[in-house]
Amino acid sequence: MTVPRLSYLNHLKYLTSTAQSCFDASFKNTSLTEASQFYSSLIQQCNKLIDPSLKCGSINYGRKLFDELPNRHVFMWNSMISSYISHKKSKEGIGLYERMVLDGVYLDEYTFSCVFKAFSNLGLINEGRRGHGLSVVLGLEVSNAFVRSGLVDMYAKFGRMKDARLLSNRAVDKDVVLFMSLIVGYSQHGDDDLTNGKLVHGLVIKSGYEPAVASQTSLLTMYARCGLIGDSLRIFKRFPNPNHVTWTSLIVGLVRNGREELALTKFRIMIRNSIIPNCLTLSRKQIHTMVTKFGLDRDIYAGAALVNLYGKCGSTEMASYAQNGFGHEAPELFNSMKELGLEPNEVTILSVLLACNNSGLVHEGCQIFATITNNQTTELEEAEALVKQVGNPDVVLWRTLLSACKLHGEVEMAERAVNKFKKNPAMSWVDVDREVHTFMAGDLSHPRSREINETLEKLIGKVKLLGYVPDTRFVLQDMDEELKKRSLYYHSEKLAISFALLMSSNKNTIIRIFKNLRVCGDCHSWIKFVTKVSGREIIARDAKRFHHFKDGLCSCGDYW
DNA sequence: TTAGGGTTAG
């Protein structure tokens, strides 16, 4: 049979209606095979017409054709849905999927293999589960690898690694796509799932997919995020030609695990190997000269990172860099960014204000704040509303708001902000032999608590001889003077430092501690004395900035 | 003859 030449849409209409009548006829007709063959060839022609219009990106035109067709084959529904999803229109894709369900269109494995992605894109977990149920009822979860990996990926994206794992266990024929979804899931949500992550790695090795470069980098990231940087390094060594993404993943992993110096070394090796870093590598590495050398100072992220140099980097080298008044460059850089027509975002503004604050550039800080706000009070109210909108605002957000209130004398709002974060208990972390130990004030839970307290008492005795006087102004609770002194002695940072001193006698090893809140004035003075009596360097990163204590002095110049 | 995963940032 020849198909008459008609306009595009009419042609499609003709094809589909012919297909439908042919399909209807096939039930009455004795020549069923012939009819169904003709039917499929017609449907193919239809999709050949409709699919390219979707693939070329003219999705609206494709939809128009789709809507006007008298009969739509499941191919067309699927093409339409997958086009929506790949064009970042998951909502529309799901809309069509739901219409298919309501209209009683027969859903097939192609429908499900793309629709789960739309659920995870939109964070629709309940709808996703319902879709999962439907695929089970239709027998597609079991029979089709595409459907299954779509489901595993969806659960992994939702962070429901247990469900993802359960589903993948059921798959007899695990393929590389399934493994990738699992590995990426574990690397992003798997802080408590290291055993499973390792297990998956084992399975990947067994199934022969290990050499795939992409999954290797994911493995590297997975181990780094779980704190096993040694394993990341081992994986990295096996790369014959690591690219800039691989390098960046390793460097970011090292920084995350507190190995800044090694990260810097790796960064230098990377440059020596002629791997050009991009703004992502640099925004972590935070190296000013590199940023300007590669012309990346126009990039807003690199710019923000550059300005943020103060707050984040824990390496001695960077600290001394910061001490040389680098903070003065922050406002200049900020202004040149604006001159270039780059709109600063909230991170840029926060960073530049932080840098001004750290360098005592009050005037510059106020000026910058003024340029971004016309009506300051209203802006502050908006800021407060914004903070409240954030699902679970953390202490950093509230503190940012608080500093803004301070700047504008907004006492009432400041009180509200203070009330939100004061509940956070003070905690300190210390890294000893690549293991992180956590301490809270008066903490007796550490297995070596008794020895830690002995070390601490001895230290207090020694520093008192050098002139340390407990400053009880930093105890806010209402109690008698002696008790106040005792409570100061057991602040979390004092416990963490005592533990580090107990564990390592090597004078060259720098002690690094982290604290979730700001270091208090008494501890600050105490730590300065401790560097004198122990001859050790101590680096403390608190919630606000970074303090480098050495020979009885601190890099912040007692201004923080 | 319509389908699935992919590492890095403040």
Image (cartoon, coloured by chain):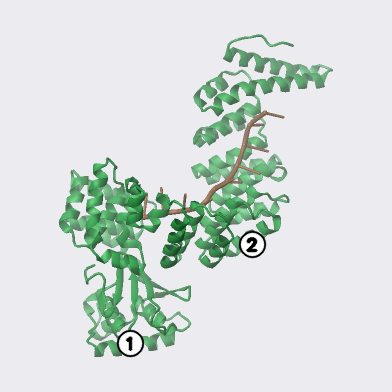
Pointer 2: what residue? A199
Chain B representation colour: brown
In front of the other: A428 or A136: A428
- Three-letter residue code for mark 2: Leu
Is residue A114 shown left or right of residue A276?
right
* Chain A colour as displayed: green
Asked if residue A442 can be seen in this view, the reply is: no
Q: Position of residue A370 (x, y in %)?
A: 18, 48
Task: Characterize the local packing of mark 1: few (<14), some (14-19) or many (20 or more) Cα atoms within 10 angstroms.
Answer: many
**Residue A539, position in %: x, y?**
34, 73
Q: At label 1, which amino acid type do we have?
A: Leu
The residue under label 1 is A459
Q: Are marks 1 and 2 on the same chain?
A: yes
Outermost right residue: A30
* Alpha carbons under labels 1 and 2: distance apart: 45 Å
For the N terminus of chain A, the quadrant is top right
Residue A142 picture quarter? top right
A145 w.r.t. A514: above or below: above
Dot 1: chain letter: A
